Every structure is written in structure tokens, then in C-alpha cells.
Amino acid sequence: MSGLAIVGAQWGDEGKGKIVDYLAAEASVVVRYAGGNNAGHTVVVDDKTVRLHLVPSGILYPNVTCVIGNGVVLDPEVLADELDRLAGQGVDTSRLRISDRAHLLMPYHRDLDRLEEEARGEHRLGTTGRGVGPAYVDKAARDGIRTADLADPEGLRRRLEAVVPRKSALLQKLYGHPGYTVDEMYDYCMRHAERLLPLLVDAGRLVQEALAEGRKVLFEGAQGIMLDVDHGTYPYVTASWPTAGGIAPGVGVGPGCVGNVAGVVKAYTTRVGFGPFPTELTDEVGDLIRERGVEYGTTTGRPRRCGWLDLVQLRYAVRVSGIRQIVLTKLDVLSGLDPVRIAVGYEIDGRRVDTFPASLAELSRARPIYEDYPGWTEDLSGVTEPDELPAAARAYIRRIEELAGVPVVRVSVGPGRAQTLATGPLLW
Ligand code: GDP
Ligand code: IMO
Ligand code: MG
């Protein structure tokens, strides 16, 4: 048995939360492997809308174990708020487990994120300001505090003594921030330990055992491939590995545990934060897509930049993340647009380019080469069978499959769990 990875194939917010919730009906375990509460995953079931930042999107099912893997950086304060909010919405969170190797996102990471962004001035990245980047920096710098440290108060204090004075000096000397004492951070950690400790597990082992018993596992991606620290539009990226390649190190399983990678693709493109975006629409069509698609960030409320679907970008995502099948979302939003356009290549300095360039300077000069297709006017939100889709919408899906080289196996036509059409067999 192997697991199914659900990854964002663009710049995030493709609808991963909705799709993971829809698929989790069949799952035994849903595990997050990367990112932190920079993620915002929205799940809509009947009249209930649930916004998740750290808790995996399988949490609405009473029999699904939800796991926060070691690859996630965990802000304990945000998690506590999220669990309280979910309880307030009547969601049972007792099946949440957390890797004992996950790194804690500390208060100074939040400060550093904000202060470093300010200091970047015109070069700022447009981070979510949640401290996620600095938490990954500390992990790689061997200055992280891990969840397992909470079980050993003496050891935790020694770790904090090794780290906090240097973090404080940085905050004070570079940014004029008062900094933190070791005692303050020790008390902070111990305050959250009570709630976290009972949830800690060896997450890799839990997942591997589930697979060995023939139970279904979903690996829930956060962000999107174009935000990957290696393969995205660096430096306008996040600090982790949203690609399926991030699963093995982010969960503690071998790469063979990932049997299929499904890429979630929005029927158009959006991006929050700065950085090049070749098919961006700054005209009224972009505004229309934003309003109809309610393209405002789940985490920060920022308006998302909107544009046409970009197959140069998508083919690249398919390759670097090993995407074998596509789940197409938000097709309903395109109703009424005529024509609908897909970028099939770029023109850069008079040359035609079909592969996604590494150079941001080149990318920012890229002029999309579009193919135009007839639009459709029908409201798709009530469609329940693929053959009820208008012919023009079906042709649009077929063209995406041809250009991407992988099949579209699910199509989403609304935020609700039931608004999902099966257009082909999903490999799981
Ligand atoms: P994620 O970060 O990939 O989980 O995506 P977000 O939840 O941040 O953003 C996707 C938004 O689109 C959410 O508000 C979803 O409820 C909504 N959504 C998901 N699928 C569809 C769809 O097919 N149609 C429409 N209209 N909305 C959708
Ligand atoms: P989900 O999981 C969209 C973007 C930020 C910024 C860049 C770096 O909901 O798809 P960071 O705070 O990570 O250092 O910010 O990455 N970003 C996202 N954009 N969806 C997300 O997550 C994102 N997580 C980070 O806007 O451009
Ligand atoms: Mg989101």
C-alpha cells in the first residue's frame, strides 16, 4: 500500500484543503509534511466553513487520524487557538497527533519575520509575517527547539540558553527590539507543553504502520510548487519544500511510500505576495476573476493577484513534483468569460520559450503566448456529472490534459465537498 500526495501545482491556494477533505472520506490518516501557519486551507461542508492553518484537512471525519509531520514548523499559540476555534465549531480534534521531531515556531521568529521584511524595504518578499521563514532558518542553523524538547525541562532550558541570548542580541542590536530572556521563553514553552505533550508521536512510524496495514494515507501539501525554496520563483518563495519530494523528509517515511502525486490546479492562476507572474491580469478581467473566485487570502486577507492558466508553469510543476494526475478546481469561476485563455509558451526577448526559466529577470520579461478558447455561460455550481458540463468547458479540460501530459481525474465546481466531479480513476 502506498499513499496519495495532494500538492499545490501553482503558487498556493489551489483548493488543496477542499480536495483533501473530499478525499479523506476514504482515508485512515491525513498528514501535513511542510509549511506552517502561513498555509490557510478552507473546507466547506454544508453550511459549515472551517479554516485550517496547522490542523490537517481530514479533521472533519471522526475516524481519520490527522498528523502534523516533522517538516511542519509549529506555532503552539496558533495551534491552541485553532483547536479552540474548531471545538467552538463542534469539530472533534481528539485524533490530532504531532511529530515529536517538529520544530517550534517561537515568538522571536514572528518578530524576525516582520522586522526583516521591513528592513528589506522595496526588496521585501511579501511573506505572510507568521515567522515561518525564520523558523526554518533556525532549523537549518541547528538553533531550533523541537517538540520532543518539551518532555525534558532541564534539557529544554539548556537548549534555550544556547539559542535565546543570540536571538535576543540579533533583535536588539539590529532592530532595536527588547528581545526575550531565557526565563520568558522557558515559561512560554512550558505553558504550551501541557497541551502538546499528550499529542506527540513518532509520526513516521505511525504513517508507515498504517500503510503496512493496508490503510489509506493522504499526504497534504501546503503552499504550491512555485513557492518551493528550490524549484519556485526564488527568492519570492516560502522556506520549505511543498513539492512531493518534501514528503519523505517531512514525514519520516521513504519516498516509496508515495504511490501517486495528484496536483491541485486552479482553472486560472493566482498568487499572493510579490514576485514575477507572467499571466497576471491587471485589468477588469483580473478583477472579475478575483471577485467571482473570492480570491482573498485565507491567512492574511490580502487580495490575490489573478491571471490566466499558465501551462509553461504547469508543465514545469508536473515535472519537478512528479505529478501524475490533476485535480482541477474553481472551473465554475470561469463561467461567463469569453474567450478563456491558456498560456502555452512565453516570448522572451523575441525568442519563444517553452520551459520555465530560472532567471527572474527573464521571467519578468516573459510575454505569454496564448491560445484562446470559446467560453461558456452556464452556472457550473450545480453540475453533478462530467457529461453535464458545457461542451466548451469539457474542451478546456481536454486541452489542459493534452498540454500538461497528465489526465484530469477530478473537477471541482464549487467550494462544497459535494461539488466535485469524477472525470477519471484516481490512483490510490
Ligand atoms: P488551499 O490553500 O489550496 O487549501 O486553498 P484556499 O482554501 O486557501 O483557497 C481556495 C478557496 O477556494 C477556498 O475559499 C475554497 O473554499 C474555495 N474553493 C475550492 N474549490 C473551489 C471551487 O471549485 N469553486 C469555487 N468557487 N471555490 C472553491
Ligand atoms: P496555502 O497552503 C499562498 C506565500 C506568501 C509569500 C511567500 C513567502 O494556503 O496554499 P512565507 O510566509 O511562507 O515566508 O511567505 O509565500 N505563501 C503562500 N501563498 N498560499 C499559501 O499557502 C502560502 N504560504 C506562503 O504569500 O509570497
Ligand atoms: Mg490557502
Image (cartoon, helix red, strand yellow):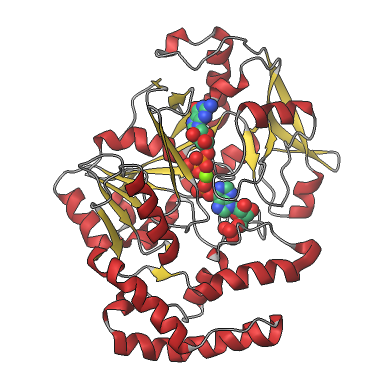
State the image coordinates of residue 298 (x, y, percent, origin top left).
54, 44
Give the position of the C terminus as an image quadrant.
Answer: top left
In the image, is 331 to the left or to the right of 256? right
Q: Which of 209 and 178 is in front in this view?
A: 178
**Picture quarter containing residue 392?**
top right
In the image, is 119 to the left or to the right of 104? right
Q: Nearer the viewer, residue 426 or 38?
A: 38
State the image coordinates of residue 7 (x, y, percent, origin top left).
45, 44
**Picture quarter containing residue 125?**
bottom right
In the image, is 297 to the left or to the right of 247? right
Task: In the rendered view, tell whether residue 14 sits above or below residue 342.
Answer: below
State the image coordinates of residue 191 (x, y, percent, origin top left).
35, 74
Q: Is residue 225 visible?
A: no
Task: In the rendered view, tell whether residue 242 sits above or below residue 326.
Answer: below
Task: In the rendered view, tell whether residue 34 sits above or below residue 324.
Answer: below
Q: Which residue is drawn at 48% across and 24% down?
A: 414
Q: Which residue is drawn at 50% across and 88% down?
A: 181
Q: Which residue is drawn at 41% across and 77% down?
A: 188
Give the position of the N terminus as an image quadrant.
Answer: top left
| Residue lying farthest to the right in this orientation | 350
